[in-house]
Image (cartoon, grey):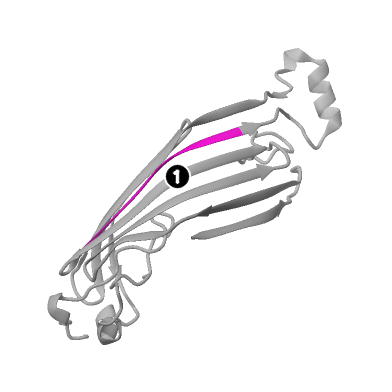
Amino acid sequence: MYGGGGWQSLRGENVAANEMVEAGGGLYHAAIRTPEESLNIDPDSRYFHFNWNLGNVSYGQGGYFSPQWQVVGALGADWRRQWGDLTARVQATVGWQRFHEHGAPVFPTDRALQSQLEAEPTLGTAGSSARSVGGPIGGLSANLEHAVSPVLRLGAIGRFSHTGNYSDAAGLLYLRWRLDKPPEDVAPLLAGMPTRYPAGSWPMPAMLSNGAPEPVQLNGGAARPVR
């Protein structure tokens, strides 16, 4: 089990100040843990609160999502499998969220401009309206990586996520050359560990959290010679 919370103070030039509070917790359960395969299940819940809604794009606004409250509940799964020199990883998340935003003026830091806008409706709307929104959230990412040599990796990765009315997708092919010692050098030290999936370096951390397929240890405990 895990839990935590935090507080942030957001400051900048020509933008209204804001504060954010968050809290959350969940359970991390290893459903499968063998030298060749692992499956982790992670139910998680989060709460977020911002003092002000500064999600609009205008003078004084921040342009970032800042609901007055947001509740998120999700169930995540992380599966990894190794077949000799080939490793695969699939991560999936499904859940539900609900949030509320207060109405926000167009110019929160300039009362004169805001008053002029409110006095002249023909100039446009004077701000955004309050709203409450709820709906499903989810995401799926997959990574396949082949060890061409002890230091060379060839892989492909794809990701899709959906939250509210926002969807995001990305994919890439990559070729990675390790400058540090390959995992085979420490295979004897890892032989007694319950898993062969230590956290490894990753060229695009934003694509997959907590590393990516990294181990390259041959079946039967054998290892390639280091070049």
Q: Is residue 200 above or below residue 127?
A: below
Q: Is residue 160 visible from the viewing direction of this image? A: no
Against 12, is 82 above or below?
below
List the single residue furthest toward the top. Answer: 122
- The prevailing secondary structure element of the residues shown in magenta is strand
Q: Is residue 94 magenta?
A: yes
- Tell whether 21 sits left or right of 172: right
Residue 112: give x, y in percent of width and height.
Answer: 86, 29
Question: Picture quarter containing residue 118?
Answer: top right
* Image location (x, y in percent) of residue 47: 59, 45
Determine the residue located farthest toward the left in the rendered image: 220
Judging from the image, what secondary structure is the residue with disc 1 in? strand
- Residue topped by disc 1: 74
Residue 14 position, x and y percent, is: 76, 44
Residue at 22% across, 77% down:
150
32 drawn magenta: no
Q: Residue 26, how many percent across, how many down?
A: 49, 54
* 185 lies above or below 75: below
Q: Is 109 left or right of 62, judged from the image as shown?
A: right
| Residue ID at (74%, 38%) | 60
38 to the left or right of 3? left
Q: Is residue 164 visible?
A: yes
In this orientation, which residue lies closer to the viewer: 99 or 227? 99
Number of other residues with Cα within 10 Å of mark 1, as a class: few under 14, some 14 to 19, many 20 or more: some
Inspect the image, locate mark 1, and give the three-letter code of the amino acid beneath it: Ala
- Region in magenta: 87-99
Quadrant of the drawing holding the C terminus: bottom left
